[in-house]
Amino acid sequence: KSGFVAIIGRPNVGKSTLLNRIVGQKIAIMSDKAQTTRNKIQGVYTTDNSQIVFIDTPGIHKPKHRLGDFMVETAYSALREVDATLFMVSAEQPRGRGDDFIIERLKKSDTPVYLIINKIDTIEPDDLLPIIDDYRAQMDFAEIIPISATEGNNVENLLSILEDKM
Ligand code: GDP
Ligand code: MG
């Protein structure tokens, strides 16, 4: 099994931390999907029977006023080239304009969008449900997966969900 997964989210939510945790190996892959300049390979997760290529789609993170129509369209198109998108938010901060900007773009994605709520180690267990409800009210996510990238909580589960869907 193999697939391409975009990982997006506002700065400092923990994207690099998660990638560092799950990417054992960085290898050069020649692929039509990965060769487009609008997608950057950030890392590859490989096991005996699967390979997940994690991709950054830079246009998605930028605030609207800095993007022309062409670049916005480019960002949408990049999402069509992946098998799934991980939208990462932080449990530590409330949903903000940066998140809402991304959500508006993700609503136009044809491929499944997984909400990754990171930094659950910073909150009380009772505080998780309101956060889930808040994001769930914004759009339909394929799944909502709370994790701690630094502690490793639920990261194995996230990977097995992604593998299953490929
Ligand atoms: P990025 O900008 O989305 O790539 O975020 P980084 O991976 O650089 O992380 C930003 C900061 O958040 C760093 O100081 C990380 O150590 C911290 N961080 C990332 N994941 C977690 C987590 O699960 N729990 C906590 N407490 N801190 C985290
Ligand atoms: Mg980073």
Image (cartoon, grey):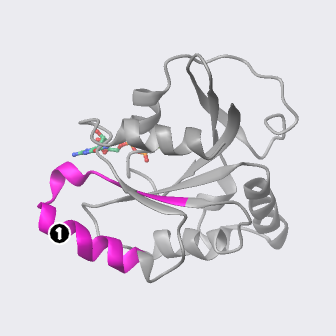
Assess whether residue 9 is covered by the magenta stretch. no
Residue drawn at (53%, 78%), measured in percent from left and top?
139
Residue drawn at (32%, 48%), measured in percent from left and top?
147
Q: Is residue 133 left or right of residue 58?
A: left
The foreground one among 105 and 154 is 154
Up-down relation of residue 48 to residue 105 (above or below)? above
Q: Which residues are magenta?
A: 114-135
- Picture coordinates of residue 43, whole percent (x, y): 59, 28
Question: How many numbered marks are there?
Answer: 1
- The N terminus lies in which quarter of the figure? top right
Q: Quadrant of residue 64?
A: bottom right
Assess whether residue 126 is covered by the magenta stretch. yes
Q: Quadrant of residue 137?
A: bottom left
- Picture coordinates of residue 67, whole percent (x, y): 72, 67
Disc 1, ligand 1: is the CB inside 8 Å? no
Q: Which amino acid, by three-letter code, is at mark 1?
A: Asp
- Picture coordinates of residue 115, whole percent (x, y): 47, 61
- The C terminus lies in which quarter of the figure? top right
The foreground one among 85 and 160 is 160
Judging by the rendered image, the residue that carries numbered circle 1 is 127
Q: Is residue 9 left or right of residue 79?
A: left
Up-down relation of residue 157 to residue 48 (above or below)? below
Q: Is residue 29 left or right of residue 158?
A: right
Up-down relation of residue 135 to residue 148 (above or below)? below
Q: Residue furthest bottom?
A: 137
Up-down relation of residue 164 to residue 88 (above or below)? above
The foreground one among 166 and 76 is 166
Categorize mark 1 by other alpha carbons within 10 Å: few (<14), some (14-19), many (20+): few
Residue drawn at (82%, 39%), measured in percent from left and top?
33
Residue drawn at (71%, 67%), measured in percent from left and top?
109
- Picture coordinates of residue 47, whole percent (x, y): 55, 20
Q: Which secondary structure lies at badge 1?
A: helix
